[in-house]
Amino acid sequence: MAAPSEGALRRSLAERQAAADAQAEAVRALKAGGGASKADVDAAVEALKALKVEAGAAARRLQQALGAGAGGAAREELRQAVVNTLERKLFYIPSFKIYRGVAGLYDYGPPGCRVKANVLSFWRQHFVLEENMLEVDCPCVTPEVVLKASGHVEKFTDLMVKDEKTGTCYRADHLLKDFCKEKLEKDLALPKEKADEFKRILAILDDFSAEELGAKIKEYGIVAPDTKNPLSDPYPFNLMFQTSIGPTGLSVGYMRPETAQGIFVNFKDLYYYNGQKLPFAAAQIGQAFRNEISPRQGLLRVREFTLAEIEHFVDPEDKSHPKFVDVADLEFLMFPRELQLSGESAKLMKLGEAVSKGTVNNETLGYFIGRVYLFLTCLGIDKGRLRFRQHLPNEMAHYAADCWDAEIECSYGWIECVGIADRSAYDLKAHTEKSGVPLVAHEKFSKPREVEKLVIVPSKKDLGLAFKGNQKMVLEALEAMSEKEAFEMKAELETKGETNFKVCTLGKYVVITKKMNQEFDAAAKVIAKALTTAGISHIIDTTAISIGRRYARTDEIGVPFAVTVDSATNVTIRERDSKEQIRVDINEVASVVKQLTEGQSTWADVSAKYPAHVGPQGDQE
């Protein structure tokens, strides 16, 4: 039986509250009239009590459905515990904190730097290397003329309001969003019609103009959250940091708000570098700067951050993609504008169907949506908390053909983490007009057409070592695979194994000596050298604290495996999540852990091959 909807629960509460109010009025009338018997008054009072109990139960059901009360407090408590751990372990900390810091600026500590480096390394592997992209590295300081041509000087703005008495600034859309969310979560007596109105506002908030935002702020009586003072009308605030280039101060520049413009202005050279052929893609990783009105939510809204951007250049008359078939069967949550405007939720859709129906504008855009989905899920993002939301009409630039955001649901709600847009040729045309340099590609007409296909090329040597007498059977099975089956196997291999292998912090392995003696220390050094030769990151822990505490210390920062030296000839390998251990000969350690790291073997594979090790007290030995 399906759970009652929020609307039904609100109606139930309103009906019971109205009945209780009517009964309370009846009790007052009986008492005031003086003609009613004591028995009649007592019966009316008991009926009122029963109605109040029913109203209270209805309120609790609604509160539970909204996730308010203890559930919300628990989520906030968990979030704060995670943030405290991240800061305590130096994943990130506020910048310049000995001087009380500046909002929106953060430093990454050693573990945070490792996570960031590994994520970016995987990004390069997944996108740049896989698609043969051209990587560039452009300056952060950008001349004003470039950003005038791109439209950033005029239009890169957020709508801001000010406290009319103190001058404190706030983002107008954030104030309206917070107001609507608070009403929906905490006002249990909110009529269904008003609740639907607030939900619709949240769905289309990014589509509001300055006038519409201002009207809603006045209609709902929204005031400055800190002082309760009245607010000004919303007005645009440019988010770029302005600077001057050179000693005269006459050459105006800006800290770049995105890395894409550096790619656009280099289009001509990149096009020639690529042999004057389309399509091609260029990528860039670098810092971007945005002078946020009210930075908040930790690392989610900051004033300096790292961007990884791709610009894919394609024939505007042919936006098909030869590898779209590789992602067409992917199914995930999509949130097209029709569902947003009707107040519905995101729905599971197959990417191929979304493109064929025109929900997604073209195959090239669809292909990169699919690749982004694979990238995020391979990093470990929960598929149920990942959706692709289409921009509403007023969100989207007039020149754009289609825009989608990959959004992740976290304790702050749905947060945009990737933007995927078909910008048409707007940027190239704008820079061509402003610079006088034609940023164009030439179409070459020819009958032959190259089609890129996924082909399996087995390595007979590796298969022989792995499967021995069964090599021939495996070869025949691989060669008989269809292209679709080959892609499915490729996708499975890409995502097989623990996602921490791609983004874990201090290392993939920790080498621990059980006792402090020269024999065990020498064995640990031999293992460490073998791991280094195999290209496997690791740390060595020879401290005197108990093994259990050392395991806990590395578990907390995400190291998936520990090699424990308790013999000069063989050692144990411990898996973090299950806490299971196997015993392996010291000469095989590097080979086993390399297979685990690269996804060639799973923990189930190696634990079936090697004997289990159970210490006297498990992790406490």
Image (cartoon, rainbow, N blue to C red):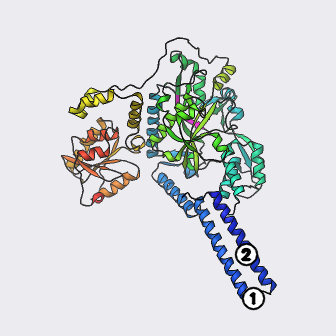
Disc 2 to disc 1, C-alpha distance: 17 Å
Q: Residue furthest front?
A: 1
Element under label 2? Answer: helix
338 horizontally vs 457: left or right: right
Quarter of the image for residue 52 reads: bottom right
Query: Where is residue 545 drawn, in percent x and y?
Result: 31, 57
Q: Quadrant of the C terminus?
A: bottom left
Looking at the rendered structure, the kind of residue marked 1 is: Ser
The residue beneath circle 1 is 37
Quarter of the image for residue 67 reads: bottom right
The label shown at residue 23 is: 2
Region of the chain picked out in magenta, as a range = 283-289
Q: Residue furthest top?
A: 446
* SS assignment for the magenta stretch, majority: strand
The label shown at residue 335 is: none
- Residue 286 is inside the magenta segment: yes
In the rendered view, would you say 290 is above or below 189? above
How packed mark 1 is, by other alpha carbons closer than 10 Å (few <14, some 14-19, many 20 or more), is few
133 horizontally vs 36: left or right: left
Query: Where is residue 143 drawn, in percent x and y?
Result: 65, 28
Query: Where is residue 232 drawn, in percent x and y?
Result: 78, 49
Residue 436 visible? yes
- Residue 184 is inside the magenta segment: no
